[in-house]
Image (tube, rainbow, N blue to C red):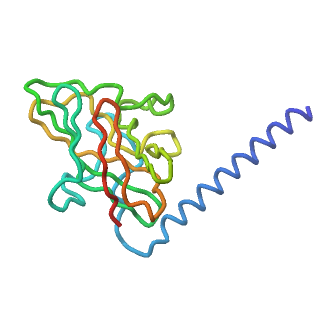
Amino acid sequence: MSIRFTTKARRGMVAMTVVAGLALGAAGCGSGGDDKKPESSPSATKSGGSGPSAQEGQSGDPLAELKGPNGLLLQIDSAARDAGGFITVNGELKNDGDKTLTIPAQLSGNETEIIRNGRSLGGATLVDSKGKKRYYVLRDTDGRPLTTTGISSIKSGETIPVFMQFPAPPNDTPDVSFQLPMFAPADITISG
């Protein structure tokens, strides 16, 4: 009986520690002092995906254009650092081919927790070669990736706005390499 109590007590302490950490993290993220709403929602949807409006954060020429399989193109419009220590990459996924394409499952990456939550761009990473670190797409408390989700196919000529959110590299690292499975990598500059 004492082993059962000890196990339950440990679980309770771990749960309390996690909740306290999340509460402190949420309080720290909300203390920026500005009244802007966040650009992305941590919830994933199964119907049309989640993401920012089509031109949010865009200022002219794209930061990069990555070529993928079968005429898929990913245009990165912005990579903005926010006060909460995150980077949000906004862009557009376009089918430049002549037929409807099924979005490759490889774009979700190979992490079990992300795959379990359906199709996404959860395989994206930012690579800081200066600091020798790789940054993976963030997840919410339920393990869902903080990226556009629910895209299963894209029609010929169609463009879909997408986003991905990552932990931010140090402030003295403005340039990173953006990588997405099956796409050519591209160097991008972080703003903010």
61 and 6: which is toward the camera? 61
185 and 30: which is toward the camera? 185
* Residue at (53, 45) in percent of width and height: 141
Q: Furthest residue to the front?
A: 130
* Residue at (49, 71) in percent of width and height: 31
- Would residue 92 appear left or right of 35 to someone viewing this image? left
159 and 27: which is toward the camera? 159
In the rendering, at what x and y percent does residue 134 appear? 47, 44
* Residue at (23, 53) in percent of width and height: 63
* Residue at (59, 59) in percent of width and height: 23
* Quarter of the image that includes the N terminus: top right
- Would residue 133 appear left or right of 41 to someone viewing this image? right
* Quarter of the image that includes the C terminus: bottom left
Q: Furthest residue to the right?
A: 2
In the rendering, at what x and y percent does residue 27 appear? 55, 65
139 up-or-down from 191: above or below: above
